[in-house]
Amino acid sequence: MRTAASDISMMNIFFLLEALLLVDGVFGVDVKVSLSVMEGDSVTLKPHTEIPEEDSAQWWFGDNIIAQMNKAAGHFSTSKGDDVGFKDRLNLDNQTGYLTITNITNDHTGLYKLKIKTTTEKSKTFSVTVHGNMTTVSVKEGESITLDTGLVEIKGYDLIMWKFKNQLIAGINTVNNTLKYDERFNGRLQQYRQTGSLIISNSRNTDSGDYHLNMSSSSHTVQRTINVTVSGVSDTQTPDPGVSPGVVAGIVVVAVLLAVAGVIYHCWKISKLKRPKDVAENNGTNEFLNKTALEANSDHL
Ligand SMILES: *[C@@H]1O[C@H](CO)[C@@H](O)[C@H](O)[C@H]1NC(C)=O
Ligand SMILES: *[C@@H]1O[C@H](CO)[C@@H](O)[C@H](O)[C@H]1NC(C)=O
Ligand SMILES: *[C@@H]1O[C@H](CO)[C@@H](O)[C@H](O)[C@H]1NC(C)=O
Ligand SMILES: *[C@@H]1O[C@H](CO)[C@@H](O)[C@H](O)[C@H]1NC(C)=O
Ligand SMILES: *[C@@H]1O[C@H](CO)[C@@H](O)[C@H](O)[C@H]1NC(C)=O
Ligand SMILES: *[C@@H]1O[C@H](CO)[C@@H](O)[C@H](O)[C@H]1NC(C)=O
């Protein structure tokens, strides 16, 4: 009985040790982190391992070195990645040694390994799978917009955040299991707890724009920008659907009444103006007549 119990505790210690090795990637254990991303994503691999000043470190993609650094010598380079199709896509953080692959494509599916040469060689391996493409979404006004994380489940990520116009609009924090929504969307947002994907229901034109996804864990960060276009629904309809026929009829009746009133007022105004003018004209004529009469008279003088 006693031997069985100690066997079990030995096993627990063994598992615990193994778990620690997996987490820290120490003692040359080749740790594997698997991540699944989409074309166009920006992916940051975070080895979580201190890179000693005087040691050199190399990032490998399959059998090729794609980036290398030596802090003490102040040497950082991603140029070797150009030869194997990473041109302008790699960024090496000169403090942390984090490697970022921007606008990743299918060709970049594979194993990424950071090797640190100390007295013994340490390494950490990431398995990256690139599939799908979620760069644009087009819907008609009123339809719902689905912004996909591409994940089957968010396990492994601490934070899944969606941003729009530099504002956090929805997010899941798996550490304290909280969910947050932006009130400006008036309850039209829904984020799946299992996948982190976001649904915006009853879309409006003002929902158009770039949405930014940020999924982060201690070992990697994935960023994605999705261009959403919400197009109007009324391009094929001739009358303005916002005005009902009843309202149109009402407007016509009011317009006719105003026109009639205008005509009546105009006639009244003309007749009112005409009277004194007629009088003046008459006066004028009278003056003319008088003048001619005077002239006529003067002729006689
Ligand atoms: C996504 O797919 C579309 C067509 O399917 C293509 O035009 C576009 O280049 C792709 N985007 C990326 C980032 O691969
Ligand atoms: C590290 O990168 C930053 C910003 O890219 C730069 O300002 C700094 O000089 C770099 N440090 C070294 C040691 O290259
Ligand atoms: C991403 O890469 C694709 C080709 O794979 C290219 O067509 C597209 O313009 C790139 N996008 C950006 C933002 O660089
Ligand atoms: C959850 O954690 C985040 C920081 O990681 C914090 O901002 C937020 O207030 C926390 N929420 C709750 C309910 O504790
Ligand atoms: C993504 O989230 C991580 C962790 O919170 C943060 O360090 C990083 O700056 C974020 N990136 C963007 C573009 O918001
Ligand atoms: C998003 O897509 C629309 C139409 O497809 C385009 O007019 C707009 O320039 C795009 N925005 C960005 C930031 O790429």
Image: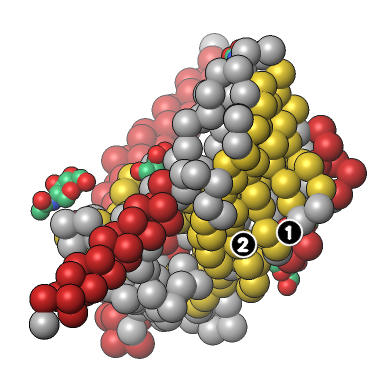
Quadrant observed for ligand 2 in the rendered image: top right
Residue contact at pointers 2 and 1, CB within 8 angstroms: yes
Residue that label 1 marks: 108
Counting from the top left corner in percent of width and height, residue 220 is at: 48, 50
Lateral position of residue 77 relative to residue 296, left or right: right
Identity of the residue drawn at 78% across and 42% down: 65
Residue that label 2 marks: 128
Mark 1 residue element: helix
Identity of the residue drawn at 25% across and 66% down: 10
Callout 1, which amino acid? His
Q: Is residue 257 above or below residue 275?
A: below
Lateral position of residue 267 relative to residue 2, left or right: right
**Mark toward the start of the polypeptide (2 vs 1):** 1
Mark 2 residue element: strand
Residue 193 visible in the snapshot: yes
Counting from the top left corner in percent of width and height, residue 141 is at: 45, 74
